[in-house]
């Protein structure tokens, strides 16, 4: 456990206690909300209070690494990290804590053989300690964002090592702790491992007062997804897209989109030079919005299909579909590999952009909007190498889609540059695993000996 002066521990404790009191004040509203959402809502509230049961078949002597994944993006980041850890320690067992419903539902399909996927505890130290105890936690690893003082303090009180890996301290993340600068500093200082994505993130930590030797730049674990097998499994989705190519369609996959972006795509797809030549695969950020997305494209006269309908008698040739809505969880990463051109959403709306790496790793040209605060480094490198294009309006999106549709050699050269942008940044997982294993290695050996 990383040593800290009593004064610094007191500052962290005060910050965690403030967050705990705030959550307690919200509990009546949270209970009412849970009741209105039926059994799933009650399950989520119970887990939020720390009343979790992994339900795995591990012996009582087995202890788990706990991975906290705020959303589905963090679950995808955890994939290469889990693979890297288990290569070095095949006996390692782990539990996933998911904050969002999307991450809870998708994590079992993204991550290999978790002992359990559970809803994360609420922002309270007692709930955190209870959940850690019930999960028989070996260590707590927080992925990328949503670092909370209650988690850090709760784990510290329980004597459990805590790491913040592939960590980003973007202006948005920093703003979440506005007014609690000292508490934020001590929260970072209390971590046993602070593995940051970039030098810019390290500089923000140092400006807070974090010791330079503690603010270690590991790199972004997302880049290492390129070292995994990303071949999509044979099945209805692959056959659908292959069928579209047989009738001369170029395929564009638009991932993690929001309403306004889908309206832009619908307008662009119906342009005379694109209609009939393009199969557009749209994966809304929330698959539950599938009906809304289908309606958006139907209003432009497009023929639409759902991913969940494939294999039930529908197909791209009878009648030919113009738009396929990906209303499933966990398939987007491999579906990007079936594209000729990719668009990454959350970037034409003020969301900071979603994971550009997942598209670029397949060697595909990547289009994205100007809102990129979650992906600034990779976006800059894609633009520098001509592997990506930033579009700022419907007109620019249409212009570049038409150009890429008609120019196969341009798609090839841009795709090669996009893959280079990912390949030159790989290696963060190996560096992170080297530092994580000493935190947990002694305990895993002890657990096996029991």
Image (spheres, grey):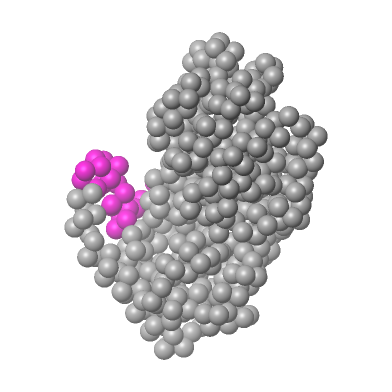
Residue 10, relative to residue 194: is it above or below? Answer: below
Q: Is residue 138 left or right of residue 134?
A: right
Residue 9 in the figure: left or right of residue 388 = left
Q: Position of residue 400 (x, y in %)?
A: 67, 38
Please say if 412 is above or below 354.
above
Residue at image position (57%, 79%) is 206
Considering depth in this image, is 441 or 360 the residue closer to the camera? Answer: 360
State yes or no: residue 222 in magenta.
no
Q: Is 44 contained in the magenta span?
A: yes
Q: Position of residue 352 (x, y in %)?
A: 52, 55
In this orientation, which residue lies closer to the viewer: 241 or 247?
247
Q: Which residues are magenta?
A: 34-59
Which quadrant of the figure has residue 178? bottom left
One can see residue 83 in this view: no
- Above or below, 315 relative to 178: above
Q: Which residue sits at x=55%, y=80%? A: 207
Q: Can you say whether 259 is above or below 10 in the image?
A: above
Residue 376, horizontal then vertical, whole percent: 61, 59
Residue 382 seen anywhere in this rendered image of the structure? yes
Residue 276 lies, in percent from the top left, at: 61, 20
Task: Give me the residue at 60% from left, 73% from top.
Answer: 202
Q: How many marks?
A: 0
- Residue shown at the point (64%, 66%) measured from the top left: 198
């Amino acid at each position: 456990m990383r040593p800290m002066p009593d004064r610094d521990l007191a500052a962290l404790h005060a910050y965690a206690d403030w967050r705990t009191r705030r959550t307690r004040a919200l509990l009546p509203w949270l209970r009412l909300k849970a009741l209105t959402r039926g059994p799933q809502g009650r399950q989520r509230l119970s887990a939020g209070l720390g009343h979790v049961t992994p339900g795995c078949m591990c012996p009582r002597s087995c202890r788990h690494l706990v991975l906290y994944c705020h959303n589905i993006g963090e679950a995808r980041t955890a994939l290469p990290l889990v693979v890297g850890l288990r290569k070095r320690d095949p006996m390692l067992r782990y539990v996933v804590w998911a904050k969002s419903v999307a991450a809870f539902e998708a994590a079992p399909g993204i991550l290999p053989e978790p002992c359990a996927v559970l809803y994360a505890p609420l922002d309270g130290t007692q709930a955190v300690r209870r959940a850690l105890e019930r999960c028989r936690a070996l260590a707590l690893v927080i992925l990328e964002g949503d670092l909370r003082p209650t988690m850090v303090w709760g784990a510290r009180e329980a004597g459990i090592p805590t790491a913040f890996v592939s960590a980003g301290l973007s202006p948005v993340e920093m703003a979440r702790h506005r007014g609690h600068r000292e508490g934020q500093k001590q929260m970072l200082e209390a971590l046993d491992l602070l593995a940051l994505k970039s030098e810019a993130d390290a500089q923000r930590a140092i400006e807070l007062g974090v010791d330079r030797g503690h603010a270690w730049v590991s790199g972004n674990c997302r880049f290492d997804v390129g070292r995994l097998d990303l071949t999509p499994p044979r099945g209805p989705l692959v056959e659908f897209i292959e069928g579209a190519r047989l009738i001369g369609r170029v395929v564009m996959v638009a991932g993690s989109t929001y309403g306004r972006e889908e309206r832009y795509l619908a307008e662009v797809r119906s342009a005379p030079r694109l209609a009939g030549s393009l199969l557009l695969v749209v994966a809304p950020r929330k698959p539950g919005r599938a009906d809304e997305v289908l309606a958006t494209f139907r209003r432009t006269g497009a023929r639409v299909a759902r991913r969940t309908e494939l294999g039930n008698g529908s197909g791209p040739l009878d009648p030919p579909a113009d738009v396929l809505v990906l209303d499933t969880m966990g398939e987007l990463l491999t579906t990007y590999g079936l594209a000729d051109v990719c668009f990454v959403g959350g970037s034409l709306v003020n969301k900071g952009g979603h994971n550009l790496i997942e598209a670029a790793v397949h060697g595909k040209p990547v289009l994205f909007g100007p809102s990129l605060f979650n992906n600034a480094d990779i976006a800059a490198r894609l633009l520098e190498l001509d592997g990506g294009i930033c579009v700022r309006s419907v007109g620019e999106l249409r212009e570049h889609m038409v150009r890429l549709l008609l120019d196969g050699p341009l798609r090839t050269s841009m795709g090669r540059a996009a893959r280079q942008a990912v390949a030159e940044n790989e290696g963060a997982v190996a560096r992170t695993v080297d530092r994580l294993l000493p935190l947990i290695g002694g305990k895993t050996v002890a657990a096996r000996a029991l």
